Amino acid sequence: MIADRMLRGIAAAAAMAASVMFAASPAAATPVSPATGSYAATATAPPSPAPPPIPDDPNDPERAREYWLDGAKIRQAWSVTRGKGVKIAIIDTGIGKPPVTFDGAVADGTDVSGVGSSDGRTPVGVRDPNHGSWVASLAAGRGKPDGTGMIGVAPEAELLSISLGFPGSASTVPFADQVVKAMKWAVDNGADVINLSFTTNTLDWDESWDEAFLYAQEHDVVVIVAAGNRGSGTAMIGAPATIPGVLTVGGVDQTGVASTGASTQGITIGISAPSESLLGMSADGTLRSWDGTSGAAPIVAGAAALVRAAHPDLDAANVINRLIRTAVKVPDMTHTPDPLYGYGLLDAEAAVTASLPAVSSNPMGDLKEWIRVYRRADAPEPSQPQPTATPVAVPPLPAVEQPAERGSPLLPTPESLRYGTLPLLALTVPGILIALGVTAAARRIRLERGRRTPNP
């Protein structure tokens, strides 16, 4: 791995730990009139023979508030399947134990936060601990036996409850490590669909997620991810919604228009579903109204479970392809996929019943190829440069003469005698002799002059 990618990975992990948040915003439990006509799907082929009827009273006040059951044609898809035999893993704060809603629904669970219960059924965290219960109730809530009360999109699918400790909880396990463990546990325990209703508000993700998400994709699991919400500070999608191969869900209001506060935008959004005036069952059995793509994602996860139940021979890539190719385009879309709507609005009936050609690859991208290109994990070693000319032999240099053993600094060396003392003697001795000769001559001259001078 090259240095800049390592630095980006470290920065991504730090940013993710600081900014991860739910893609939801709870609201007061107030009555909501059901929307009709605006969130509608186009006609599809006649459904297959209907299974035994499910208790469903559309006139029940609570169920009437679930406008997406008709708007996204979920009720029509129930004439074919209700998700039996499919497992949806909810990686969130944990699925609580309210009466009725999850009776017989949760097949297994675990905790990866270190502060929850071993079955993943104890809500974790102090901020929105019911978040996981709300998400699960939208995906596969059971409803009451008489056909009243809140019901999920795939009411016969099973759930896996995996409790996370989001930043701000008492968990001391790094969030990135929790997600890795949760993803692998979900796959190893039979998940067909994984729902992730959170965002990190950063495009990059921890490098350890490469292996975890690739593990899910290579084991034929559909991974559904919430896009995030502007109202919570997510101006643009962040990981895990940016990971290739996941199906990212944007949010719309009851009229099918992209939500301003309960959604965001980004080029990886693949499909849109309702994200405003949603319902969610809390752990204590209280029904709450809430907003956010945290709720849009499990609606699509439930639809994915319906497709997998109706077409057990399809792999994950073709399940995702059915969801996006049968989505209903809206007038506001400027591209396909559109940064607000993706391929359009969810149409569960069409996704279950339409006749579509098979695809050989995931239309939402190839994570393995992305890793190869951007992580350089499998890049070959750079080749060594080859010489282009014949080398020329160079004769060796003569050996360096080793200096003699050092003696006393007070004694002369041969070199000092040869180059210092002898030349000095050669110059000094003749000079002394000349000086002595001159001196003797001068004395003789003075003596001669003294003899010639007469005495008085």
Image: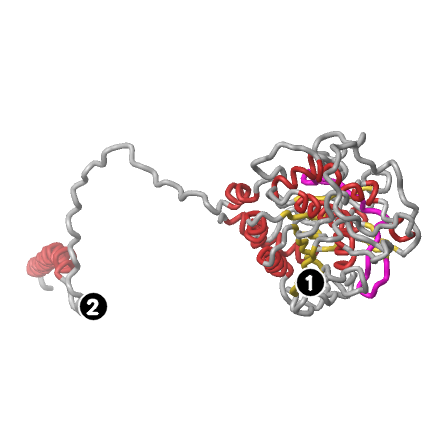
Say which residue label 2 marks: 409
Estimate the x, y position of residue 382 in percent, counting from the top left: 40, 42
Quadrant housing residue 247: top right
Q: Observer-nearest residue: 207 or 323?
A: 323
CA distance for labels 2 and 1? 84 Å
Q: Observer-nearest residue: 362 or 204?
A: 362
Q: Would residue 435 be seen by someone viewing this image from the given angle?
A: no
Task: Give above or below for 106 relative to 8.
Answer: below
Which of the marked residues, 2 or 1, is nearer the chain's N terminus? Answer: 1
Over which residues does the magenta segment extend?
264-287
Amino acid type assigned to the residue bearing label 1 in the image: Ser
Amino acid type assigned to the residue bearing label 2 in the image: Pro
- Magenta-span inclusion, residue 284: yes
Is the C-beta separation of discs 2 and 1 under 8 Å? no
The circle drawn on residue 163 is 1
Q: How is the image coloured?
A: secondary structure
Q: Would residue 423 be seen by someone viewing this image from the given angle?
A: yes
Estimate the x, y position of residue 216 in percent, counting from the top left: 58, 51
* Number of callouts: 2
- Which is in the foreground here, disc 2 or disc 1? 1
Quadrant housing residue 349: top right
Residue 369 in the figure: left or right of residue 13: left
Q: Observer-nearest residue: 315 or 402?
A: 315
